[in-house]
Every structure is written in C-alpha cells, then in structure tokens.
Image (cartoon, helix red, strand yellow):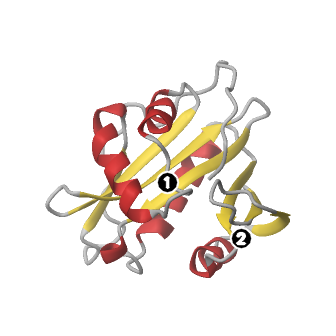
Amino acid sequence: MGVFRKIRSRWRPVADEQEPPAPPLDPEWPYSIRPLTVAQLEECWRLDQRCFADGEAYSRETFQYLLTAPDALCYQANAADGTMVGFIIGIIEPDFTGHITTVGVLPEHRRRGIALRLMQRIEEAFRKCGVRTVRLEVRATNHGAQKLYRNLGYTVTQRLPRYYSNGGDGLLMVKALE
C-alpha cells in the first residue's frame, strides 16, 4: 500500500460491472468472490483495520476514493453466511498498468486460499481490460504475502525504503500478464 496520486479518467472496457458472484472454484471451498462496491465501504474499512497495523491500514476516505474511482477493480470474499472476510482493490493506471493497491484477509480466515483466489480474480479482470503488467507493494517483512506473490509469478524489482507511513520498508513486485 502506498500514497495515491490522482489518476485521470479515461475510456476503458468496463469489466465485471454487473457481474454475478462467481461460484466457488470447488464445492469444498466455503467462500465466494463477488464485486465490492462503495455500499460496503464501512465493512471493508473495518476489515482493513483488523488486517493491517497502524501505518499500513487505509483511512475511510482513501477507501471511499478507491471504491468510487472510475478505473478501480474491487472484489470481496465472503463466507457462506455472507460475512466479508477479505477484499482486493486494484487500479488501472493511465499507462494501462494494473496496480494492486490492497489485499486483505481477516486473520482467522487466512491460509485458506482466499488471497490466492482474490489475486486470480483481479488478474483476470485486468486482462479483460487490456492490462499487460501488474504491480504491487508489499511490506519487506511480510514473507507470507511475498511467497504467495512469487508463486503467482511476481518478482521483486525494487526495495522501497521507509515506504510505509510507520517507517517500514516495502518491496515493489511486478508480473507480466499473458
């Protein structure tokens, strides 16, 4: 996560605007992935506060911006009872680079494939919009997330000293989409 710069609106194919929730990839997986909208702002913001430490969690205003940005792709993961347990937000930048700005999964739901499926869903949506390169930032000490991203084909291209507002270093990771 990092500091956002305002991006210009421009025409692009709209992906997944009225898309129905995707069925679970297998019947044993008790979660679903569906679009995330500004209507879930409060729930998403509260979930983010539980997922990230001070200096990493976004403000409510940042989430409002992200969830209403014209070039944003936003998804939520829900448990069988409909409770949001994870989310992912990406922005298509003016050069058609996809920027995954945040991925969060509640601690008690981690290590169940939720982040993996959220990443796969957003990459699929980026492809539909003509994105060929995706980037993200990850805390240098978050080895679990780095392993997930490496397994998905991301590579570290740069260390970002004092990237997070609490002074933590970040890593820039990039992937070419096929």
Q: Nearer the viewer, residue 56 or 178?
A: 56
Mark 1 lies on residue: 57
Read off the residue under disc 2: 153
Q: Residue shown at 46%/38% (left/top)?
A: 63
Location of the C terminus by quadrant is: bottom right
Q: Residue shown at 61%/51% (left/top)?
A: 100
As drawn, the residue found furthest toward the right would be 158
In the orientation shown, which residue stands out farthest toward the front? 166
Tell me whether the residue at label 2 lies in contact with that at label 1, contact meaning CB atoms closer than 8 angstroms.
Answer: no
Up the image or down, 4 lies above or below 122; here it is above
Q: Position of residue 81 (x, y in %)?
A: 14, 60
Q: Which sits earlier in the primary sequence, circle 2 or circle 1?
A: 1
The picture quadrant where one finds residue 3 is top right
Q: Amino acid at mark 2?
A: Gly
Amino acid at circle 1: Ala
Between tags 2 and 1, which lies in front? 1
Name the quadrant containing residue 119.
bottom right
User: In the rendered image, which quarter is residue 85 located in?
Assistant: bottom left
Secondary structure under the numbered disc 1 in the rendered image: loop
Give neighbour class at mark 1: few <14, some 14-19, many 20+ (Cα, 10 Å): many
Distance between mark 2 and mark 1 Cα atoms:
26 Å
* Residue 86 drawn above or below residue 94: below
Asked whether residue 61 is in view, the answer is: yes
